[in-house]
Image: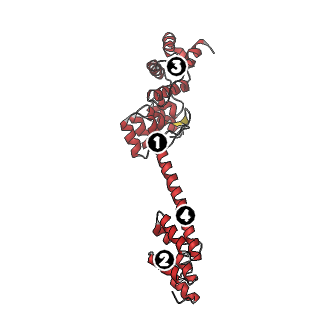
Amino acid sequence: MNDFDDIIFNEQWDRVLEEISKDKSLIGQIEPYDLAWKRFQYQIAENGIEELVLPYGNFTDLLKLIEICKNQGLTGLNIPQATAFQQLDQIKILLNQGHEIDEQDFGERTGLLVAAALNDVQLVNFFIDNGAFVSFYDQDNLEAIDFTTSDEIKKILNKNNGRTKAQRQQDYDEYCDAREKLNVLREINLSFMKAAEKGDISQMEQALKNSSMDFMTLNFAYPINGWTALHFAAKNNDKRAFEFLVSKGIDTTKKNIDGLTALDLAKTLGNNEL
């Protein structure tokens, strides 16, 4: 590694500026990735997303260096790099060459994520208009909306279904909570049906009290045969259980997979007392 590489590696941007002011040919030794990545990294630090790790230089000097290099023909070699350099024309060229709109670099970051971090409304709109995946998230589970500090960009991304990490965590927590409630309800429904099979009115009543959706529990039917609690009362010729279920408001018109209501089943079995 030569001296020029050393000062780039140590992010001494003021010294890099000094060296290239003496010899513009040194720009040819600079890798686009190095400047593009640092541009993005410094910006997300500026936005409060991450902290820079020493050694690091002055952000203003880095921006000056990038502008000088761009004026000397430096371009991003992929979509995220070109976005970090805010080179819309280069992005269009890369897309025409076959690069994907959601091409990734900088740790699974797309151009849209980079544009959002740079608070560049024009580029954000360009990516969305060209089909970029707004809900794409990086290795840290952050979407474009998590990177920006621009209220305008946040509104644009929200309008296009962008969700912050906190919002997605809340959605997940609500999903898990709903799933848990459904599992509890399923167990209650099954206990209700087991009680119905035995004609245990006390246990059926307790299951209905425990249910968060008692009407659903009351009218639950086994998927395999379509039998409700009322069908079991009819099968068992259990007038007391039958009347209990009817008094609770069970749907007497529900049919099993054979097309029989509970009363139809009772008649078929010769249980005419119901």
Tag in front: 1 or 4:
4
Residue 14 x, y percent position in the rendering:
48, 14
Which residue is painted at 52% across and 52% down in the image? 176
Tag in front: 3 or 4:
4
Judging by the rendered image, the residue that carries numbered circle 1 is 166
Extreme residue toward the left, this view: 152
Q: CA distance from mark 3 to mark 4?
A: 57 Å
Q: Quadrant of the N terminus?
A: top right
Residue 37's place in the image compared with 109, above or below, is above
Which residue is painted at 39% across and 46% down in the image? 159
Residue 43 x, y percent position in the rendering:
46, 27
Q: Which mark is residue 245?
A: 2
For marks 4 and 2, the one nearer the N-term is: 4
Judging by the rendered image, the residue that carries numbered circle 4 is 186
Extreme residue toward the right, this view: 1
Judging by the rendered image, the residue that carries numbered circle 3 is 56
Residue type pointed to by label 1: Ala
Q: CA distance from mark 4 to mark 2?
A: 19 Å
Residue 181's place in the image compared with 230, above or below, is above
Viewer-nearest residue: 158 or 21:
158
The kind of secondary structure element at disc 4 is: helix
Residue type pointed to by label 4: Arg
Q: Is residue 153 left or right of residue 194?
A: left
